[in-house]
Image: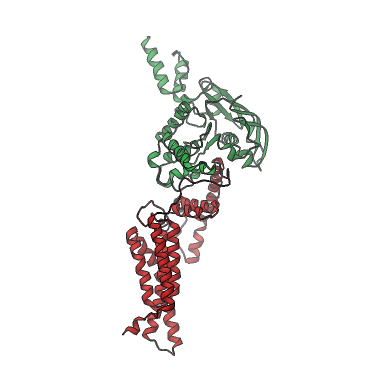
Chain colours: A red, B green
Amino acid sequence: MSVFDGLKFRKVTSPVHNLDPRMKFIYVIVIFVSAILFSSIIPLMVLFVMQLPFVFVAKVQKQWVRSLRGAAFLALFIFIINIVTSYFGNNFTLLASNIEAAIALTLRFVVLIESFSVFFLTTSPDHLGLALEQSRVPYEFAFAFTTAVRFVPVLAEEAQTIMDAQKARGLELEKGNLLKRIRNYIPVLIPLIVSAIRRSLELAEAMESRAWGASKKRTNLFSLKLHKGDYALLALSIGVLVGAIYISFFVSIPTITSLF
Amino acid sequence: MALIDIKNLTYTYPGASKPSVYDVTIKIEKGEFVLITGPSGCGKTTLCRCFNGLIPHFYQGEIKGEVTVAGINTFERHTYEMAKHVGLVFQNPENQLFALSVEKDVAFGLENNAVDREEMRKKVDWALNQTGIYEIRERSPHEISGGQQQRVAIASVLAMEPEIIVLDEPTSFLDPLSAQKIFDVIYRLNKEQGITVILVEHRLDLTAKYTDHLILMDQGTIRLEGDPREILNKEETRLIGVGIPKATLLYQLLKKEGFQLGGKIPLSSDELAEQLLEALEHR
């Protein structure tokens, strides 16, 4: 079940992993907003390069490249659409500036994907759940989130077991056309869903037995505290946001084609 | 007054045609090590759910009789109030752990009870140490073995410092060595911390020797109750289909052949070995 491998969580520590997820999220939003403010290639390249130190300090290069590769198809799609529309819009001519604009818009998409992937690659689900709780998200939601993450490997294993059992009885999963193949998975899905429901009942029982709902305001074994690094990241976020707004409104940005 | 006092309990699950437990009356004293056994489907699990009020609060259905645990009528209080008095450990270790790390799981009950962080830390560490899993406290539940998972489940109810711990077939998913470790932990909690233990088990070979009070169930009723040595030596017990300890069986066989052993009826191979050695010396 290589599909689920990406969803497994591991405890990793690095200066980036240890940052407060709330601050990281603010940073992601700032990058997001900045990327939308610009539509020319130079500032977008700057935004792209700005993420790289985080990737390397957190040592998540491999996963990061994999997530970008996943986005490559959509990026290519955006690029082609842009080229085609400007080609037809300009009386069937294609200028160098049109190509540059297409590249810039593709790059914008890549920056958006990149910032979110850095966030999720460097934030443990445990931390994220804690951040949700401390951001006054109702505990039920934070709990649902962490429990879902907790049971991903369990369900993946179970799906594998059911698949093996059904194959042993002669079920052929990789046979027929696309529609047939999807239909082949029904004998796997039904037992999986039934056992998940049964599992959820047992889980509810265990929660009840461990004083779920005993007090309105529950406490937590851990709490997120802001450290120096988090304040630095916040300052950086504010700086980037202010800089981006200033540049996009008051500075005329040269395009690469106009430089030559 | 007994710590657990059940009077004429009859319970039927919603949609079931006949009751799962029928006219059950039990008294359990503080500090006892109670073993409940009997063939599958005899109502052991149902009885466990009655100890902390899961029945009748979580499961609807029809209930008659009276259940008093630690002086509280379980029909009138929420399960979360009972959680401070009764810790329930279930059969499948995987489905009772829901946090992303061992220590978060152990802290879960305390968090729900809004215990202060410092006090919580102390209690969590105590529970982790009592069950011998302090070293793996930062691991996630799917990275550890089934035996370790079950010890986490025990620690997570232990952290709430209950007077009673109920374990519903805690070792049915485990290998013999892990099972033995679980029983050692439970026995130590019973002897050192004075926690009343109610254990539902089929593995009598490993557990009978710890037991003060044996309850033998069959088809929703209590068939025999009391001293384990007496009960396990009865023909009736064997006919119900209980896995009588090998040592006890051997003792019975020897006795049948006219080989008299002194002392009490043995429940473990250690006890039997002692008696055999003694008998051989006197020849």
Q: Quadrant of residue B218?
A: top right
Give how far across and how far down residue A79 sits, in percent.
41, 77
Residue A158 visible to an observer of this rendering: no
Residue at the extreme left of the image, as rendered: A260
- At 39% across and 86% down in the image, what residue appears? A94
Residue at the extreme bottom of the image, as rendered: A91
Which quadrant does the N terminus of chain B fall into? top right
Between B94 and A140, the one nearer to me in the picture: A140
Between A67 and A122, the one nearer to me in the picture: A122
Q: Is residue B61 above or below residue A44?
A: above
Q: Is residue B6 left or right of residue A56?
A: right
- At 44% across and 38% down in the image, what residue appears? B122
Q: Is residue B74 above or below residue A43?
A: above
Q: Is residue A111 above or below residue B208?
A: below
Which quadrant does the C terminus of chain B fall into? top left
Give how far across and how far down residue B228 sits, in percent.
52, 22
Give how far across and how far down residue A219 sits, in percent.
51, 46
Q: Is residue A112 left or right of residue A191?
A: left
Give how far across and how far down residue B225 sits, in percent.
57, 24
**Number of numbered callouts drawn:** 0
- At 37% across and 13% down in the image, what residue appears? B280
